[in-house]
């Protein structure tokens, strides 16, 4: 059976445009995230203009062959670079920029062509501007369409900004959208607690999912943009479904013991002989199971509350323990404004 496939594209400096900071470093960190999960991912397929090597549409088309793309449970495409909104759609700029209009990638077209290869899930991450631009000619989907039969995939889309607006990349930090995602997927300590999915937490599992990552990105990116006196609102759509919606499955944070599963609890319950006079053994057993489960879950959540302040930065963690709610304030993510903040659009030197 095929594994998941990650396709990363980083174009830090298309012809005639300013260089974006940290783009290639971020692509390397995304690759490391994939390489740590070899049981479910094949080696990442990366395209980068680092060292002056151009990223062209022909190179993408020749490299992304049917044998590579077909029958994948998930394909992730992650683009970091300059972009725009032109002719009613989002485009990505490859190395030739406006000099060759066919080298501008139609994001919608690229996604639709990838769908013809029949992945179960398709995840598109776009970290680029969507500022308005007038272009000569039409952009291209780049890839060749597969002509065989295919089903419709579940789709995740993570865009760094909304139509008509820029995305930002502060000097020394890089694109704040990708920095936010990497703070979750490639955190040297532990992901922010707010990025973990509460649906899984309720059963003692620590998982970053499509929905929890989208919620974290939607909440965090505007705050980081505000810290550098800019406005940036991401546009996300989490279309993956439980329980194949994971981006990261984790062991519990140090010091937290997850509650047992329902099967483990049932196996541990006391068993007594059944009397002919017993009329509601099942109800009695269910009641005991619920009471036992509540006790274990209560212990789990109070451990979580005690440890949440040490799990890394987040804006606040709201944890429910039965009928009680407590909010734990944590340190905010703060970026000191730099002398120059790059827009990830078509700003040219001078």
Image: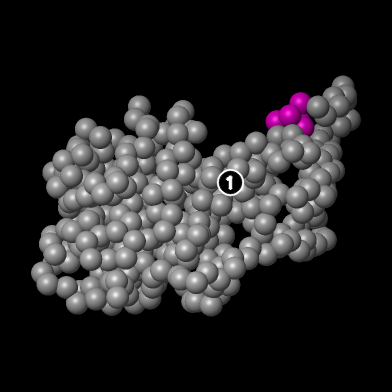
Residue 176 image offset from top left, x and y in percent? 49, 62
- Looking at the image, residue 139 sits to the left or right of residue 269; the answer is left
Residue 322 image offset from top left, x and y in percent? 80, 55
Residue 325 within the segment the image draws in magenta = no
- The correct choice, above or below, for 222 with respect to 43 in the image is below
Tell me if residue 166 can be seen: yes
Residue 41 image offset from top left, x and y in percent? 41, 34
Q: Nearer the viewer, residue 336 or 105?
A: 336
- The correct choice, above or below, for 201 with respect to 338 in the image is above
Q: Quadrant of the C terminus?
A: bottom left
- Looking at the image, residue 301 sits to the left or right of residue 77; the answer is right
**Which quarter of the picture shows residue 337?**
bottom right
- The correct choice, above or below, for 44 with respect to 85 in the image is above
- Looking at the image, residue 131 sits to the left or right of residue 302; the answer is left
- Seen as rendered, the residue at the extreme top is 273
- Looking at the image, residue 152 sits to the left or right of residue 257; the answer is left
Residue 324 image offset from top left, x and y in percent? 83, 61
Q: Nearer the viewer, residue 156 or 128?
A: 128
Q: Residues within 10 Å of mark 1 (few under 14, many from 20)?
A: some
The residue at which mark 1 appears reads as 187
**Which quarter of the picture shows residue 205?**
top right
- Residue pictured at 12% horizontal, 62% vertical: 100
- The correct choice, above or below, for 350 with respect to 125 in the image is below
Residue 265 within the segment the image draws in magenta = yes
Colouring:
one colour
Tell me the magenta residue range.
262-267
- Residue pictured at 81% horizontal, 40% vertical: 296
Q: Nearer the viewer, residue 230 or 222?
A: 230
Number of on-image labels: 1
- Seen as rendered, the residue at the extreme left is 137
- Residue pictured at 20% horizontal, 74% vertical: 87
């Amino acid at each position: 059976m095929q594994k998941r496939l990650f396709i990363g594209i980083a174009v830090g400096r298309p012809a005639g445009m300013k260089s974006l900071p940290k783009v290639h470093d971020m692509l390397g960190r995304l690759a490391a995230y994939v390489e740590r999960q070899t049981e479910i991912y094949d080696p990442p397929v990366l395209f980068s203009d680092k060292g002056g090597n151009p990223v062209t549409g022909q190179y993408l088309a020749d490299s992304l062959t049917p044998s590579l793309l077909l029958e994948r449970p998930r394909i992730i495409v992650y683009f970091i670079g300059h972009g725009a909104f032109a002719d009613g759609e989002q485009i990505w700029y490859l190395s030739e920029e406006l000099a060759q209009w066919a080298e501008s990638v139609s994001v919608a077209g690229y996604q639709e062509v990838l769908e013809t290869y029949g992945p179960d899930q398709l995840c598109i991450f776009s970290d680029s501007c969507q500022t308005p631009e007038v272009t000569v000619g039409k952009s291209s989907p780049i890839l060749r369409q597969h002509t065989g039969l295919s089903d419709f995939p579940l789709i995740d889309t993570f865009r760094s900004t909304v139509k008509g607006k820029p995305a930002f990349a502060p000097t020394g930090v890089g694109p704040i959208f990708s920095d936010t995602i990497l703070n979750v997927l490639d955190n040297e300590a532990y992901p922010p607690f707010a990025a973990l999915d509460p649906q899984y937490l309720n059963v003692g599992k620590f998982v970053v999912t499509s929905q929890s990552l989208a919620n974290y990105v939607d909440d965090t990116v505007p705050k980081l943009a505000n810290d550098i006196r800019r406005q940036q609102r991401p546009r996300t759509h989490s279309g993956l479904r439980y329980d194949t919606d994971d981006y990261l499955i984790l062991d519990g944070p140090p010091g937290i013991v997850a509650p047992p599963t329902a099967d483990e609890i049932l196996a541990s319950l006391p068993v007594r002989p059944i009397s002919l006079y017993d009329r509601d053994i099942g109800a009695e057993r269910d009641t005991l199971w619920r009471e036992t489960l509540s006790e274990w879950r209560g212990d789990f959540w109070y451990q979580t509350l005690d440890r949440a302040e040490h799990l890394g930065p987040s804006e606040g963690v709201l944890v429910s323990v039965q009928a009680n709610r407590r909010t734990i304030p944590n340190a905010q993510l703060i970026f000191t404004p730099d002398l120059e903040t790059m827009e990830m659009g078509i700003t040219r030197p001078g």
